[in-house]
Amino acid sequence: MFNNILIIGSGTMGQGVATLLLSKSLNVTQVVRTPDAVKITHDNIIKALTKLVRRTKVDIDFNEVFSRFNVVTELDLNSKFDLVFEAIVEDLASKKAIIEKYDNYITADTIWATNTSSLSITDMAATYSYPDKLIGLHFFNPVANMELVEVIPSILTSEDTVNRCWDFCIQLGKSPVRVEDNPGFIVNRLLIPMINEAVGILESRVATVEEIDSAMKLGAHHPLGPLALADLIGNDVCLSIMNALYSSTCDSKYRPSYLLQKMVSAKKLGRKSGQGFYTY
Ligand code: NAI
């Protein structure tokens, strides 16, 4: 099983997955972009682990955890990893550039897992030195609470890679579902167009933010309304997924709502920026 794991990206998902792996006794190196991000990531992981201790009532020795956790801006040149977990911005060119940038830190056995929500796994695999070892492992937000992981092989991924990642998800206490590489996989192909439609309803003044969210909570039994969910996911992430669905299918049913585009331009990204459809 994987033990020496590199996480690239320290946003919502990079931190969520780091917390999960650390709670399962795994060794984690997390590479971040700025010295400031080193401290922020450390502090956020302490908070997340403290919350986990409170919720699960399982004791965690923080000193022991931090002996297995390394947050850095630059990797040691001799480092090699069993698993690389990429959780950077949802942009294909950036994800491919990262695969090339970290080529020195992998071996022929290293599995590269991307947390992409919608982009082509096959496109990324074709950039990786060992295409049979690249796979989509789509964790959900918040990572600690959400059971599902979509396991997405590309047409180049080996069955051995799929099996190892499947077993890894089980080891982490998650419930994997296998999905063929297609835009949005299962969950986001259903969920993000629904959010986009909710933004369209708001834009055309059919109902207010609160009315739309109440309607879906009370009428469809959703635990969270679609606009509150957009704020949780991040409006920029939702827009990137709509753009990926639209550009890869050329189907107008996936056209991003204009209001969603304006929210992102105005940096109203949701919880992470303090302002989205709601104020935080
Ligand atoms: P985020 O915006 O919170 O964090 C992105 C991270 O990537 C930041 O640490 C940022 O510094 C880093 N980054 C951005 N551009 C980079 C680059 N060119 N090179 C290196 N690092 C870079 O994003 P979030 O929400 O954590 O999403 C990350 C990935 O996970 C995306 O592919 C997204 O689609 C996916 N995802 C997001 C979910 C969500 O609910 N937010 C759920 C499941 C998957």
Image (tube, rainbow, N blue to C red):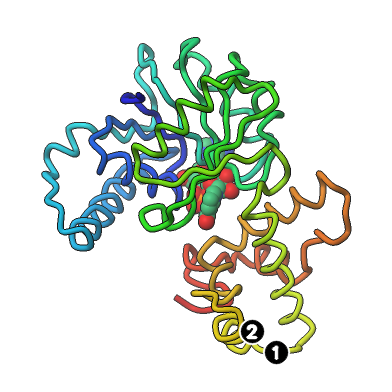
Q: Identify the residue at image location x=76%, y=89%.
A: 206
Q: Nearer the viewer, residue 101 or 215?
A: 215
| Residue type, label 1 | Ala
Point 68% across, 60% down: residue: 190
Please tell me how many numbered marks the rendered image carries: 2
Question: What kind of residue is marked 2?
Answer: Ile
Give the quadrant of residue 89.
top right
Q: Is residue 230 above or below residue 82?
A: below
User: 70 and 65: which one is in front?
Assistant: 65
Left or right placement of residue 74 versus residue 236 in this view:
left
Taking the spot 26% from the left edge, 39% from the top edge, the residue there is 24
Tag of residue 207 = 1
Q: Vertical placement of 179 versus 280: above or below?
A: above
Please state the horizontal and vertical placement of residue 161, each as a whole percent of the image: 52, 23
Marks 1 and 2 sit apart, C-alpha to C-alpha, by: 6 Å
Q: Position of residue 118 (x, y in %)?
A: 66, 46
Please tell me whether mark 2 sits on a helix, a strand or a loop: helix
Disc 2 crowd, CA 10 A, few/some/many (<14, 14-19, 20+): some
**Dividing the image into 4 quarters, which one contains the C terminus?**
bottom left
Mark 1 nearby-residue class (10 Å; few <14, some 14–19, many ≥20): some
Check disc 1 and report its element: helix, strand or loop.
loop
Q: Quadrant of the N terminus?
A: top left
- In the rendered image, residue 92, in percent from the top left (x then y), is placed at 68, 37
Task: Say whether disc 1 or disc 2 marks the residue closer to the N-terminus.
Answer: 1
**Which residue is denoted by mark 2 in the rendering?**
212
Mark 2 and ligand 1: say if the CB distance to the nearest ligand atom is below 8 Å: no
Tell me: residue 79, above or below residue 172.
above
Contact check, label 1 and label 2, Cβ < 8 Å:
yes
